[in-house]
């Protein structure tokens, strides 16, 4: 708690804040308004929050002074006050009310001058909701504020995703929505928003601000990873990577975290340097296992990082690399055989494979290995056929191991 | 207009339900004035056509008049007078004059009636909102006008001019009222004009309900059940009728139904002549017949009745409580009895059954009416639950209650017999002592109130003022007409605003508006609790009666009476105002207006539907079916229940009612307050404690609040569970039993190990039967229960969950989250390990491992895998046909695809059988087989790779299990 403030001083500070806010609105100064609305990013003790603590009747003051903003200012002040006293749930509730009032007004404004402020509101409401949910979860209550924030942002999106100058701000809100949905695990809700963004004919996607486009592509790319739609995911994540601000390494890392597994699954391996630069060492072993055909290493790597990979959602993608590792193994055997006895290079005996796997510490019986070979052929990772009678894998004479070339398995 | 016509046409189309549905959709488009004209003309034209039920009408008329006579000589005059003048205004005047016999203030009202009417006709009428018109009428003594209408039934000749105009608008506007129904019906009988079809429907409602009731009541013991049946039946009806009728069912209709049911049943049964018109009209008459004695308030009432059932009902109560001297009322009843011996008889049955002890003799009709009304009320709030369309009902009826508030609520829920005589008598002095002008004054105040809470406050203020005046002795001397209105307890929107809103959207139901309001002005807490508690208590006592008799009611009635009275006053002002808007707005309950109008439309639609089904409904088969349907709901109870004593019946009746009441309250509370969140309610107080001792119970999805007598307490449920466990009956039986156990657990909010056990048992059974939907239900409940710390077979079900997600939902995200949520210990569990192994086999497409795991599956993992086997085999054979060359031996395929079972010692069990099975399977899937040199059967992989296909499942049966075939389903009853 800050030092004691005189009533007059508190009154003055609140009045000052109110008039700045009112001025920003009357001057259509979006940037100033945005900075004044940043509730959750403010430190716990600011001149204003101290003043609010010292002057408990601030809501009345606000509504008396600016009666036309009476549904907005008191709630906003309450939100700031609750936030500074770390009552996040209350802060969220107040802020949502203020935000609703603001949205109401925003709808009526012809020009998008307040877009920046609207974006701040969108961001703030999400951050506040996250804090509120943490608080609620700690006290054993149902954390539903983020969900509420999601539905509020849907309203904001509805106000923005219309024809006209405001549409340019829609993508930002979309990204905030993505963040909420991903956190809540309700990513299926993204679909409607995506449809609205991608099917709009009167607004070119490229006209959105770059930062929003990158965020959008990142999230939609991640969605495609969930759907195991690797080609589209690759495309989106690559777009995000290319357009992302090269200075912001953390963002680049986030993108790469999903782009690398996608690339791996379509047969493109990252350099060690890249992994090191962006601190993605968890992928290093997997990449090595792919180059070596070391199934044991792959399993180890997946095991070690299982929790992390499950959480980020790429575990299943990486798990599927298993077949590629088998293929690599077969290819290595093939190369060795070609060196030893070129005549029979394209015939690989099943017990050789079984022996190799056993040497790798993987106990599989003949039928299982046979099945894997069948799968490799079936999935076009190997060209050739399997002769059951003689238990021999017969490789095609030309290009027995076709490159994936961006084709997913 | 057009819509109306269409509706009419549809109505004439009698048989097709679809058509009626269409009509209903049309109906919301209001039939404005012209439609009224239209119907009118048609009716006149038809007037000559048929005199099917003249006798009935007459008799009805007699009933109707009798009460009036009892009360005042002018009753007869009234009718005559009204009948004479074709001009509306003159009628009005006359009627009002005739009504002036009422001790209070009629003369006052009487003065402004004519102008009002004119307004009513010329101003309001054009406005689309029927309700407003209707209300205006009501407020302005139009009751008189309406009464002629009733009388009009009697004397067909004069009826047409006045009543038609009147009626048409009244009818269109107020369709929901059963009074209107009645009217319609009469039209129907006289003319079979196209428009009449519409009208006919209401009647049909009645009749249909009638039939079922009559049947049920044919035996005296059965009779007692009729109420219950009705309760059940109606929701049931609505369920059915609502969808077909474009979801437009009106509250009004429900009221009508109920009423008609009650009255009709009693009436028609003894007389053994089921004159549909007679019954209906009688019902409608019953309203007025009661009303006339009350007159001052009553004047309004009859109108309301015609207009709106809900209003009428509430009006009744109030009348009794306030104005109506008890004696006249009872006289009325007697009179009725005299006139209609059958009636009384029936009535006797009803009241005896329901209320048993009280009021048998004097009140017969009164009790009957009250019964109906109470039911109506009870039903009204319930309906919205069942059919969302009905939600409008609640606000309406509540509005009607208006002044009534906390205290009134209970009264509202269960209109009481006691009210009639006891209260009426008791309050007579009170009522009489209150001058009409005071009532006007209070009405003025009340009119300004915008919502229930405020009205409550207003009421209390009025009460205070009145008390003060009484104590001062200025009650009669004070000029209440010039008394300034006291300031409203809360700030509110001005009435004009509301009115304009109302005008602009005549169809808007009050519900949304109410919500809007309540969001900002939450309902008083006390309000809610007050409402809930009495009923809850009543429930606990098992005696609903006690609730009825509470002094609260009396007060309520008194208030209500005041309210009704005071309604007149605003009208005076209104008439003077030039614009329609203002007029409407100044009514005390603008919402009501809106409601009624929309209601009426829907009502018409609904009734149309019924009309169409009339022929059907009257047929004996249909009757039987209905009876059967209504009895369905009682099956859970003792089969011996029929032979129970009347006391027991009464108890159960009270019980049912109380349950209804609670659910009604819950619903209405919910409706009331956007502010009153569900979690704010004291669910503990409402939690059922079961008393049923029977172990076996069939599952029936609850359509109302649970009845403790049919709910089993925990220890019985345990026995039931072990019974199911050891039972040798089939899955459907067990599923049914487990569902009922689950239901009982849920309604008693039991969440412990037993709950977990029940769900686990059910989930396992469902797995074994391959019933995935049921399994998923149980699984999701189990997830929650485990999460809340209840112990159970968590690992086993984690494994099931994993398998279910990976094999049957194919949702990668779900799988990820399921896998991520596994704890370290869980991953060490055998079953979970197995499930994870299955997952990795699937992800690499390793069918060999999959089938090995299939054979080694712990618990019921194999049951889940089994559902995937077919697909996996097909994938495998596709893979093999592409990758193997030139052939694959069938024996090998049979072995790796799980057709062969290799014993631990390596010997092949039933080798031949299994191979044959594999061969058949391969052939069925299009594989091309050949015999090689050694005589071994091989798959020609190259040829097969293009011919493989997935055959249609030939023996697909419910739940994927032949033992659950349809025949079985039918066999279980």
Image (cartoon, coloured by chain):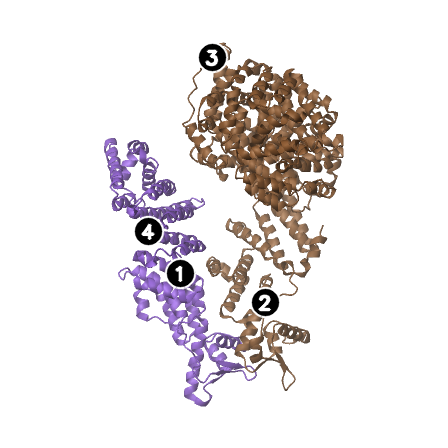
Chain colours: A purple, B brown
- Both marks 2 and 1 on one chain: no
**Between marks 2 and 4, how big is the CA–CA gap?**
51 Å
Give the mark nearer the N terminus: 4 vs 1: 4
Is residue B547 visible in this depiction of the protein?
no
Residue B2 or residue B470, whichever sits in front? B2
Q: From the viewer's perspective, is the residue at label 3 or at label 1 nearer?
A: 3
Kindly identify which residue carries mark 2. Answer: B869
Residues at circles 3 and 4 in contact by the CB criterion of under 8 Å:
no
| Above or below for B395 versus B884 | above
Q: Which mark is residue A169?
A: 4
Can residue B820 be seen here? The reply is: yes
Q: Position of residue B373 (x, y in %)?
A: 62, 29
Write down the residue under mark 3. B479
Instruction: Tell me if B927 is positioned left or right of B784 in this view.
Output: right
Q: Nearer the viewer, mark 2 or mark 4?
A: 4
Of residues A297 and A157, the one nearer the viewer is: A157
Q: Residue at x 51, y 68 (%)?
A: B842
Up-down: is B684 above or below B368? below
The Cα–Cα distance between marks 3 and 1, rounded to whole angstroms, is 78 Å
Mark 2 to mark 3: distance in Å?
90 Å
């Amino acid at each position: 708690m800050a030092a004691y403030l005189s009533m007059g001083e508190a009154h003055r500070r609140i009045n000052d804040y109110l008039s700045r806010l009112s001025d920003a609105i009357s001057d259509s100064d979006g940037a100033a308004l945005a900075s004044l609305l940043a509730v959750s990013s403010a430190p716990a003790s600011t001149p204003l929050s101290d003043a609010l603590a010292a002057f408990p009747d601030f809501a009345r003051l606000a509504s008396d002074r600016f009666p036309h903003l009476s549904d907005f200012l008191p709630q906003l002040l309450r939100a700031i006050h609750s936030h500074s006293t770390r009552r996040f749930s209350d802060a969220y509730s107040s802020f949502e009310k203020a935000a609703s009032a603001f949205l109401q007004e925003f709808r009526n404004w012809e020009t998008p001058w307040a877009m920046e402020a609207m974006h701040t509101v969108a961001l703030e409401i999400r951050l506040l909701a996250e804090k509120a949910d943490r608080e609620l979860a700690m006290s054993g209550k149902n954390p539903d504020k983020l969900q509420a924030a999601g539905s509020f942002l849907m309203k904001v999106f509805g106000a923005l995703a219309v024809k006209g100058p405001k549409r340019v701000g829609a993508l930002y809100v979309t990204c905030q929505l993505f963040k909420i949905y991903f956190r809540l695990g309700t990513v299926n809700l993204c679909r409607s928003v995506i449809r609205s963004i991608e099917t709009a004919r009167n607004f070119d996607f490229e006209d959105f601000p770059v930062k929003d486009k990158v965020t959008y592509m990142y999230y939609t790319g991640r969605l495609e990873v969930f759907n195991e739609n690797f080609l589209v995911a690759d495309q989106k994540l690559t777009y995000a990577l290319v357009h992302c601000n090269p200075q912001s390494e953390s963002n680049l890392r986030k993108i790469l975290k999903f782009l690398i597994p996608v690339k791996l699954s379509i047969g493109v391996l990252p350099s060690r340097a890249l992994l090191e630069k962006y601190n993605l060492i968890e992928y290093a072993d997997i990449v090595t296992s792919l180059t070596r055909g070391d199934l044991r290493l792959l399993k180890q790597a997946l095991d070690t990082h299982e929790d992390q990979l499950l959480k980020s959602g790429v575990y299943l993608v990486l798990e599927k690399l298993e077949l590629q590792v088998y293929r690599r193994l077969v290819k290595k055997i093939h190369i060795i055989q070609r060196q030893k006895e070129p005549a029979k290079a394209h015939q690989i005996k099943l017990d050789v494979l079984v022996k190799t796997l056993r040497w790798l510490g993987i106990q599989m019986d003949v039928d299982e290995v046979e099945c894997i070979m069948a799968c490799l052929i079936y999935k076009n990772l190997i060209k050739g056929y399997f002769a059951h009678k003689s238990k021999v894998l017969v490789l095609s004479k030309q290009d027995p191991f076709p490159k994936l070339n961006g084709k997913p398995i | 207009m057009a819509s109306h016509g269409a509706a009419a046409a549809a109505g004439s189309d009698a048989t097709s339900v679809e058509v009626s549905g269409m009509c209903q959709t049309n109906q919301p488009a209001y039939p404005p004035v012209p439609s009224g004209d239209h119907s009118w003309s048609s009716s006149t034209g038809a007037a000559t056509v048929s005199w099917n039920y003249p006798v009935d009408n007459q008799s009805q008329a007699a009933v109707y008049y009798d009460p009036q006579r009892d009360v005042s000589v002018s009753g007869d005059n009234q009718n005559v007078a009204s009948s004479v003048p074709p001009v509306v205004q003159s009628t009005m005047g006359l009627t009002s004059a005739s009504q002036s016999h009422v001790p209070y203030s009629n003369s006052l009202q009487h003065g402004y009636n004519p102008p009002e009417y004119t307004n009513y006709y010329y101003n309001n009428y054009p406005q689309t909102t029927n309700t407003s018109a209707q209300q205006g009428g009501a407020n302005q003594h139009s009751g008189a006008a309406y009464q002629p209408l009733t009388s009009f039934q009697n004397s067909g000749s004069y009826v047409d001019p006045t009543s038609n105009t009147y009626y048409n608008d009244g009818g269109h506007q107020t369709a929901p009222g059963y009074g209107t129904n009645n009217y319609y019906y009469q039209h129907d009988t006289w003319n079979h004009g196209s428009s009449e079809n519409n009208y006919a429907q209401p009647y049909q409602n009645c009749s249909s309900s009638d039939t079922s009731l009559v049947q049920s009541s044919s035996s005296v013991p059965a009779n007692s059940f009729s109420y219950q049946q009705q309760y059940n039946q109606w929701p049931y009806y609505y369920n059915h009728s609502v969808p077909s009728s474009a979801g437009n069912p009106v509250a009004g209709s429900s009221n009508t139904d109920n009423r008609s049911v009650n009255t009709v049943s009693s009436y028609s049964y003894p007389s053994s002549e089921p004159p549909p018109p007679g019954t209906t009209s009688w019902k409608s008459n019953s309203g007025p017949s009661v009303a006339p004695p009350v007159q001052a308030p009553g004047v309004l009432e009859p109108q309301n009745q015609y207009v709106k059932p809900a209003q009428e009902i509430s009006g009744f109560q109030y009348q009794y409580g306030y104005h109506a001297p008890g004696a006249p009322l009872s006289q009325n009843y007697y009179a009725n009895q005299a006139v209609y011996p059958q009636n009384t008889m029936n009535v006797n049955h009803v009241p005896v059954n329901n209320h048993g002890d009280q009021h048998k003799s004097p009140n017969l009709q009164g009790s009957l009416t009250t019964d109906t009304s109470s039911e109506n009320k009870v039903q009204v709030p319930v309906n919205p639950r069942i059919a969302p369309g009905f939600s409008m009902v609640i606000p309406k009826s509540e509005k009607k209650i208006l002044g009534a508030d906390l205290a009134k609520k209970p009264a509202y829920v269960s209109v009481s017999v006691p009210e009639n005589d006891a209260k009426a008598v008791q309050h007579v002095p009170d009522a009489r002592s209150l001058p009409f002008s005071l009532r006007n004054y209070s009405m003025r105040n009340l009119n300004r109130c915008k919502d229930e809470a405020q009205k409550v406050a207003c009421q209390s203020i009025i009460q205070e003022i009145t008390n003060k005046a009484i104590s001062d002795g200025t009650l009669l001397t004070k000029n209440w007409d010039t008394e300034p209105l006291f300031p409203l307890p809360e700030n509110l929107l001005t009435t004009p605003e509301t009115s304009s809103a109302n005008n602009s959207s005549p169809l808007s139901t009050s519900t949304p508006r109410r919500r809007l309001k309540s969001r900002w002005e939450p309902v008083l807490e006390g309000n809610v609790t007050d409402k809930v508690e009495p009923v809850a208590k009543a429930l606990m006592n098992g005696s609903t009666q006690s609730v009825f008799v509470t002094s609260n009611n009396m007060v309520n009635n008194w208030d209500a009476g005041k309210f009704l009275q005071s309604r007149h006053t605003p009208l005076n002002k209104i008439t003077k105002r030039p614009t329609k808007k203002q007029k409407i707005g100044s009514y005390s309950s603008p919402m009501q207006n809106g409601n009624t109008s929309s209601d009426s439309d829907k009502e018409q639609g609904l009734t149309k539907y019924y009309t169409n089904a009339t022929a059907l409904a009257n047929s004996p088969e249909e009757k039987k079916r209905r009876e059967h349907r209504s009895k369905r709901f009682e099956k859970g109870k003792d089969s011996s229940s029929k032979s129970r004593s009347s006391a027991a019946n009464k108890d159960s009746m009270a019980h049912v009612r109380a349950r209804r009441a609670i659910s009604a309250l819950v619903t209405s509370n919910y409706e009331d307050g956007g502010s009153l969140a569900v979690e704010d309610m004291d669910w503990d107080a409402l939690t059922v404690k079961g008393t049923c001792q029977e172990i076996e119970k069939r599952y029936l999805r609850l359509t109302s609040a649970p009845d403790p007598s049919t709910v089993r307490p925990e220890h019985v449920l345990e026995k039931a569970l072990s019974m199911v466990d050891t039972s040798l009956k089939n899955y459907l039986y067990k599923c049914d039993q487990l569902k009922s156990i689950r239901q009982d657990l849920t309604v008693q909010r039991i969440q412990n190990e037993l709950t977990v056990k029940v769900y686990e048992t059910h989930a396992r059974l469902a797995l074994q039967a391959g019933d995935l939907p049921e399994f998923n239900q149980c699984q999701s409940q189990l997830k929650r229960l485990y999460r809340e710390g209840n112990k159970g077979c968590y690992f086993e079900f984690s494994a099931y969950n994993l398998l279910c997600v990976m094999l049957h939902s194919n949702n990668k995200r779900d799988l990820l989250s399921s896998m991520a949520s596994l704890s370290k210990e869980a991953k060490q569990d055998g079953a979970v390990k197995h499930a994870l192994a299955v997952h990795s086999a699937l992800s690499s497409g390793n069918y060999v491992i999959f089938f090995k795991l299939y054979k080694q599956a712990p618990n019921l993992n194999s049951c889940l895998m089994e559902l995937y086997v077919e697909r996996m085999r097909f994938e495998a054979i596709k893979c093999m046909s592409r990758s193997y060359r030139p052939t694959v031996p069938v024996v090998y395929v049979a072995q790796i695809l799980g057709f062969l079972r290799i014993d631990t010692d390596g010997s092949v069990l039933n080798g031949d059988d299994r191979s044959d099975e594999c061969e058949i399977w391969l052939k069925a899937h299009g594989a091309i087989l050949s015999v090689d040199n050694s005589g071994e059967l091989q798959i020609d992989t190259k040829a097969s790779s293009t011919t493989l296909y997935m055959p249609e499942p030939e023996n697909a049966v419910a739940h994927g299990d032949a033992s659950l075939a349809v025949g079985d389903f039918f066999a279980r009853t």
